[in-house]
Amino acid sequence: MTDTDLAPARPGIYSRGTETVDTILKAALDVLIGEGAEAFTIRRVAAACGLRVGNVSYHFPKKEMLVQVLLDEIMEKYDAKLEVNVRQPELSDEDRLRLVIIICLDDICTKRTTRLFTELWALANHNDFIAERVRSFYAKVHCVIGEYVQRINPALSADEVQTLSLFISASMEGTTPFLGFQKPWNAKMPAITAISAAWFIHLVKSMKPGEIAELTQALN
């Protein structure tokens, strides 16, 4: 196990340290979004937030720790958004899944998400630790989708629920290079979102146990 196998949940115990960590994290996001994966170094982040390299590395000895905390905080914000908008007792599970789909696709249209996750995938291509953190992030997204897939269609097996959840998530994430922020067909995202919200719900409701296996076998 290396020292990047587990970063602290969030550095900066004291108030002054917390403010410093907030400054570092904002600069890290700015560098990733504005300059890309190649520029993402502790030295560049330090320059971006006006701190010495030693001050940044005190809280984040390696850039991998920066990525871990950034993803943890992004997931916490998503979870808070779901709590307010999705996890409401008056909503049906279909409505909840529909809202998750809309929230995800709306988020893909933002500059932060379009550029940040593109650059994180670029980092993940050459860094196993970051690749695992990104995988873990998306696994949590799949679990959120899977929770409602299972409730809408309880006849499906756990593996079928996981496969459908992966398909829905991958289909949405795949829109990024085509429909994300400043991408060629960004103007079409409202229509794609409407189709996705309706069609994914229909797919989940209509999928029969064993049907995924049958479709897979038909390809062979």
Image (cartoon, helix red, strand yellow):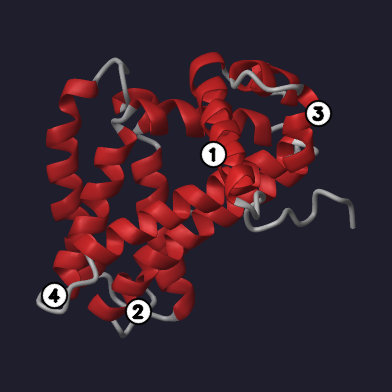
Contact? badges 2 and 1 (CB < 8 Å): no
Q: Tell me which corner region of the image, top left, top right, bottom left or bottom right, holds residue 43.
A: top right
Contact? badges 4 and 3 (CB < 8 Å): no
Q: Nearer the viewer, mark 2 or mark 1?
A: 1
- Which numbered disc, 1 or 4, marks the residue that appears first in the sequence? 1
Q: Which residue is mark 3?
A: 54
- Say which quadrant the N terminus sits in: bottom right
Q: Which residue is mark 1?
A: 22
Report how far apart the C-alphas of labels 1 and 3 lie in the structure.
16 Å
Q: Nearer the viewer, residue 216 or 54?
A: 54
Report how far apart the C-alphas of labels 3 and 2 lie in the structure.
57 Å
How dense is the environment of label 4, judged by Cα within 10 Å: few (below 14), some, or many (20 and up)?
A: some
The local secondary structure at tag 3 comes to helix
| Amino acid type of the residue that numbered disc 2 sits on in the rendered structure | Pro
Q: Which residue is mark 2?
A: 209
How dense is the environment of label 2, judged by Cα within 10 Å: few (below 14), some, or many (20 and up)?
A: some
Give the x, y percent position of residue 186. 23, 22
Report whether 42 appears left or right of 28: right
Q: Residue at x 20, y 47 (%)?
A: 196
| Amino acid type of the residue that numbered disc 3 sits on in the rendered structure | Gly
Disc sitting over residue 106 in the figure:
none
Give the x, y percent position of residue 131. 67, 44
Q: Which residue is mark 4?
A: 92
Q: Nearer the viewer, mark 1 or mark 4?
A: 1
Report how far apart the C-alphas of labels 1 and 4 lie in the structure.
37 Å
Q: Nearer the viewer, mark 4 or mark 3?
A: 3
- Using the image, determine if residue 67 lies above or below residue 77: above
- Which numbered disc, 4 or 3, marks the residue that appears first in the sequence? 3
